[in-house]
Image (cartoon, rainbow, N blue to C red):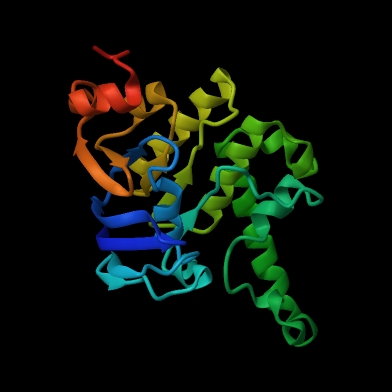
Amino acid sequence: MLEVKHVTKSFGGINAVADCSITVAEGSITGLIGPNGAGKTTLFNLITGHYKPDKGRIYFQGQRIDGLRPDQVFNQKMYRTFQITREFAHMTVLENLMLIPPGQVGESIWNTWFRVKTVRKQEVHLHEKALEVLGFVELLKLKDEYAGFLSGGQKKLLELARSMMADPKMVLLDEPGAGVNPTLMRKLTANIRKLCQENQITFFLIEHDMDLVMDLCNPVIVMSEGKKLMEGTPREVRHDERVLEAYLGGQYR
């Protein structure tokens, strides 16, 4: 589904991503690990159009996307979250979800005057869909709360809910487990599995929590110094000497 081919990105003469090639299979939950500075978030930024690669090409569902803007990548059915959640803090949880679907009729001021019934019909549909999604991630009781008042874990669930409103083919998650307590983490991982299995959404995630990665992801890609060091099953990653020494500190021996 996703192909990164020999991509390089430099900042001030330093290669953040260096001749990197990876693939993400459709229907997978693929993990991306590596130390700080390995190039993981830069790679996500390249895939989603926030940066343009200096060299190389990126393909999504067979179409080249490395020349697209972030909004154009989003319209290709790819959704991306960030390490720090980017909710609209002064809007309600429900409103945060209803903003997401692209191409809403009511976005045009003329339609709010001359296509009132159409606008209202779509808003009713989106409202119902948002309530269904909030029920799925167990945030329905908080639908009228301001998003800025949610806990860190609840905000991560809100991000996942927002992604569902976009009907994506692939979701890129940047450290979904950061700042999430164990109870909400179980909900988050269960939801990711369910969305992958039942909604056929492919997930590609960066994570430093090795227990989460080893439990949730297969395959796991390891980056080092801007390149792919290795790729394999969680078991293979756990027993790879380079990974054990550089990233896991031998804890899985």
**75 to the left or right of 90:** left
Residue at position x 46%, y 58% in the image: 45
In the rendered image, which quarter is residue 48 located in?
A: bottom left
Taking the view exactly as shown, the residue that stands out farthest to the front is 13
| Image quarter hosting the N terminus | bottom left
**209 to the left or right of 159:** left
Q: Report how many numbered discs are placed on residues in the image.
A: 0
Residue 178: image x %, image y %? 55, 31
**82 to the left or right of 66:** right
Near-viewer residue (196 or 240)? 240
In the displayed structure, 212 sits above or below 116; it is: above
Near-viewer residue (199 or 51)? 51
Residue 129: image x %, image y %? 59, 53
In the displayed structure, 46 sits above or below 241; it is: below
Residue at position x 28%, y 43% in the image: 28
| Image quarter hosting the C terminus | top left
Near-viewer residue (201 or 88)? 88
Near-viewer residue (99 or 212)? 212
Residue at position x 80%, y 85% in the image: 113
Residue 176: image x %, image y %? 51, 37
Residue 33: image x %, image y %? 36, 36
In the rendered image, which quarter is residue 211 located in?
A: top left
In the displayed structure, 204 sits above or below 188; it is: below
Residue at position x 57%, y 25% in the image: 184
